[in-house]
Image (cartoon, rainbow, N blue to C red):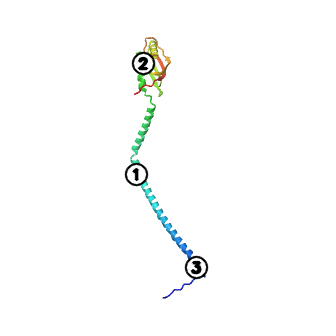
Amino acid sequence: MYQVKRINLFAKQKKYLQVEKYFSWLRYGLIILVALFVVFNIFSFTVLSKEQQKIKSLNVTSKQYLDFLIKNNDIEAKFIFYKNKNNEFNKIISNDVNFLPYYQVLNESIKNSTSTALLSALTINKDRTTDFSILVGHYDSALVFIKYAETEDFLKNFEALTLTEFSGQLKSKSQTVDSGDNSITLTFKGKFKKLNEN
């Protein structure tokens, strides 16, 4: 058999073995580094592809929602309109005085006092404070109504009531409210008692 002779370029065998050992470590280090680089790239590619799929899915979903909103724009506008109207209605109801029961009580009381007395103006606030004016046709009717306004039957509906104004002139005692001439106006200010409003 033929043997190949090698030439040792290093002067000393020890030095050659030491250098070969360093190159061996360098080779193993490079192999490990390349392996780590490949594993990192595979991991990064996997994560990026999953994220890209999520982004595509979100884009498709957002496009579907956008198409739905465009198709149903009128419905949404109507919904917003009705929601605003409902909010306004709830605001009105929360500030509502519930005028009718108080009006009915006052009107019935006025009818019981005298036949010539008429309710000409009425305001009621949320806290049940009221201002109202009564028209009567002559002084006798005014006196009869004032006496009736001082009775328990009339005052049972009020926490407080005062006559704030007594005004008007009549040319004669025989004139009435229906004649169209001047009449007497009695203006009251007070506060209604809370009624059972149901």
Whether tag 2 and tag 3 are in contact, CB under 8 A, the answer is no
Q: Quick one: SS at disc 1? A: helix
Task: Name the amino acid type tagged 3.
Answer: Tyr
Q: Is residue 21 left or right of residue 114?
A: right
- Asked whether residue 182 appears in the rendered view, the answer is no
- Where residue 65 appears, x then y in whole percent? 41, 50
Distance from disc 2 to disc 3, alpha carbons, whole Å, reads 129 Å
x 41%, y 53%: residue: 61
Residues at marks 1 and 3, CA–CA distance in whole angstroms: 71 Å
Q: Callout 1 environment at 10 Å: few (<14), some (14 to 19), or many (20+)?
A: few
The residue to which callout 1 is attached is 64
Is residue 16 in view from this perspective? yes
CB contact under 8 Å: marks 1 and 2: no
Q: What amino acid type should be assigned to the residue bearing mark 1?
A: Gln
Picture disc at residue 110: 2
In this view, which residue lies farthest toward the front?
14
Residue 16's tag is 3
**Image depth: mark 1 or mark 3 in front:** 3
Sequence order check, earlier mark of 2 and 3? 3
Going from N to C along the chain, the mark reached first, 1 or 2, is 1
Q: Closer to the observer: label 2 or label 3?
A: 3
What separation in Å lies between label 1 and label 2 (alpha carbons)? 67 Å
| Residue depicted at x 48% and y 19% | 187
Percent position of residue 57, x then y: 42, 55
Left or right relative to 145: residue 25: right
Residue ranking furthest to the top: 173
Pick the quarter of the image with the C terminus: top left
Residue 66, image x, y percentages? 42, 50
Q: Quadrant of residue 12?
A: bottom right
- The relative height of residue 129 versus residue 9 in the rendered view (above or below) is above
* Residue found 44% across the figure and 59% down from its top: 50
